Amino acid sequence: MKCVKVPLKQLNDTRINLMEKGLMSMEYRIKACDDFGYIPITEDIDDYTIVDIELEPMKKVPHNFSELLEDELTHDEIENLRTSFDTIGDVVILEIPENLESKKQIIGDAALEFTKRKAIYMKKSAIKGTTRVRDLEFLSGVDDSITIHKEHGARLKLDVRQVYFSPRLATERKRVMESVNDGERILDMFCGIGPYPIVIAKNKNVDITAVDINKYAIKYLDENIKLNKLKGNITTYCGDVREVSESFKTKFDRIIMNLPGLAYTFLDVSVDLIEDGGIINYYEFSDSYETGIKRLENACSKAGKQAEIINCRKVKSTSPGEWHMAIDGKINS
């Protein structure tokens, strides 16, 4: 490799000068040996001593996932590949288009190299069933689907094969947590492994009732309660919230309804359990706020109550033209 040879005391100044002129090669490491330094260059330069010496190549660090696939996939295939993926603790879950499934191993290995995580999986189905899980296929790394995800200072243990969890709702969970006041009695009707209850109870002195129909979700929520130092208290129930709620002896200052596909079918339960002046954090999939607002208002009207809409927010896009919507309503008699 052609290099400029300079005394060590001139090495840094010469390096800066060559970089500013665009003459320094960035593909090799500068070498220092005895009293001289050797700077790789892209072309011959007057006024410097030029020598030919073996240098160590720079390790190329990919700037994005696609760079690792440039030699394996065509430009059109890379464009078709969804390079955004979910990172949950040290597990990565990819969504690979059907036309690229024949190259799933190459893509999985590239994701492992790029993310430096423990395990790479790919989605094999949509979220399904009452337990809200999806089929996953192991691609690369170590086939261990249990991980601990960190969010807003909380630790959330889970098995990505057995429970539903979206790291993309972290900002929404923080927003709700920051709106909570100490002393609130809160019901999370579809709690999963407890990201809302754990994040809230870690920061607020509250009493939370957490319900989920998935026994594995409740198992991990119970573990997460022990994993975290909480200011508040969390009581867990496994079962259908419509049935479990019949045993509740109190109403709630806040009810969280993050089951956007089916939450609307439980609005009657929520409206019945909310304290006068309490807040319902209601979520649904929709193309506009109007549908969710009307559903909440209608449920309140049937119970002889009124819904004062205090906030509407698009949490994330779920498909073209459809959003995961958040609607916050204050419920009054």
Image (tube, grey):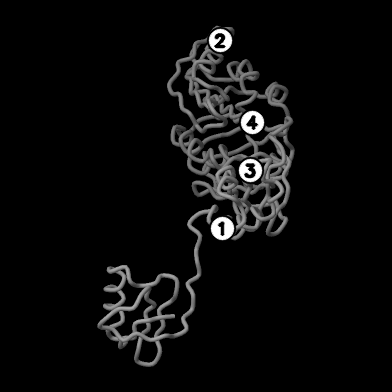
Dot 2 or dot 4: first in sequence order is 4
Q: Amino acid at mark 4?
A: Phe
How far across and down, in percent of the image, does residue 154 sit? 54, 48
Front residue of this view, candidates 202 and 151 = 151
Dot 3 or dot 2: first in sequence order is 3
Dot 4 or dot 1: first in sequence order is 1
At mark 2, the secondary structure is helix
Above/below status of 79 relative to 291: below
Identify the image quadrant of residue 111.
Answer: bottom right
- For disc 3, the neighbor class at 10 Å (few under 14, some 14 to 19, many from 20) is some
Q: Which residue is mark 4?
A: 190
How far across and down, in percent of the image, does residue 229 sit? 55, 49
Front residue of this view, candidates 77 and 89 = 77
Q: Which residue is mark 1?
A: 68
Q: Residue at x 70, y 53 (%)?
A: 139
Marks 1, 3: nearer the viewer = 1
- For disc 1, the neighbor class at 10 Å (few under 14, some 14 to 19, many from 20) is some
- Mark carried by residue 298: 2
At mark 3, the secondary structure is loop
Above/below status of 243 relative to 193: above
Q: Amino acid at mark 2?
A: Asn
Q: Which residue is mark 3?
A: 95
Marks 4, 1: nearer the viewer = 1
Question: Tags 3 and 2 in contact by the CB under 8 Å rule?
Answer: no
